[in-house]
Amino acid sequence: GEDVEQSLFLSVREGDSSVINCTYTDSSSTYLYWYKQEPGAGLQLLTYIFSNMDMKQDQRLTVLLNKKDKHLSLRIADTQTGDSAIYFCAETINDYKLSFGAGTTVTVRA
Amino acid sequence: GAVVSQHPSWVICKSGTSVKIECRSLDFQATTMFWYRQFPKQSLMLMATSNEGSKATYEQGVEKDKFLINHASLTLSTLTVTSAHPEDSSFYICSARATGVPGTEAFFGQGTRLTVV
């Protein structure tokens, strides 16, 4: 996970937008992913983006990809209490392995 | 999305015993499955890559004789922690990639919390 970096914590007010940032290292990564992990649970795929895209929107989620800077972000619009979780970004290594960041703990406050 | 089922979701075992964890892809075939270990408040550490019908590929530093992986069919991979010790206590998560679609998302099981006492 050391090759993928994320900020560790994010606190956001309910109803505001959350932005989680990630930097990765492998410029040959074909897919980049965002996963959500709730306490004691496995990982849930939220969304992914193919490397030839620079933006993907899926309901409240917007993924932005800056390939030049190897920067990936996840924006959650209208953040709800159910969005409190740990969010992991991941890149594909050698087209099949996933390398994860350390995870960003998002806390939604009322 | 595709479903990956992991069993058991939690297990407590005595030091020195072995524990088997199952990972099943319920509605798709998975030639490749991955086993991860997650320490509290940390990221996932890839332990090994398991390909159906062949030997698993272990990451550096992971003892293959301690963590036995078997991938006997396109829908089932097992991880056996042999002679478990308290330091093996962790959260183990498997993931599976659909056959013939390289580079697409991997689907994760719900994880198994292993506690060795």
Image: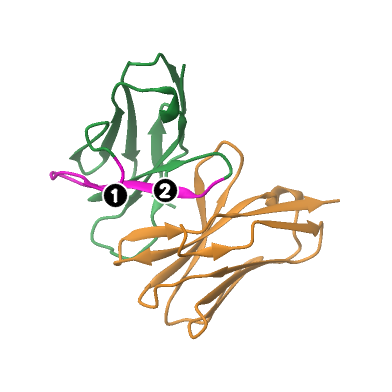
Residue reaching furthest to the top: B14
- Is the C-beta separation of discs 2 and 1 under 8 Å? yes
Q: Estimate the x, y position of residue B68 in percent, counting from the top left.
A: 24, 33
Return the chain for callout 1. B
Q: Which chain is green?
A: B
Measuring 20% from the left and 45% from the top, which residue is drawn there? Answer: B56
Q: Which amino acid lies under the numbered mark 2 shown in the image of this protein?
A: Met
Q: Which chain is orange?
A: A
Q: Is residue A4 above or below residue A55?
A: above
Q: Residues within 10 Å of mark 1 (few under 14, many from 20)?
A: few
What residue is disc 2 on?
B45
Q: B26 or A41, which is in the foreground?
A: A41
Label annotation for residue B59: 1
The magenta region covers B42-62
Q: Estimate the x, y position of residue A59 in percent, counting from the top left.
A: 63, 66
Q: Is residue B65 left or right of residue B13?
A: left
Q: Is residue B90 above or below residue A32?
A: above
Q: Estimate the x, y position of residue B99 in percent, counting from the top left.
A: 25, 56
Q: Estimate the x, y position of residue B48 in percent, counting from the top left.
A: 29, 46
- Quarter occupied by residue B37: top left
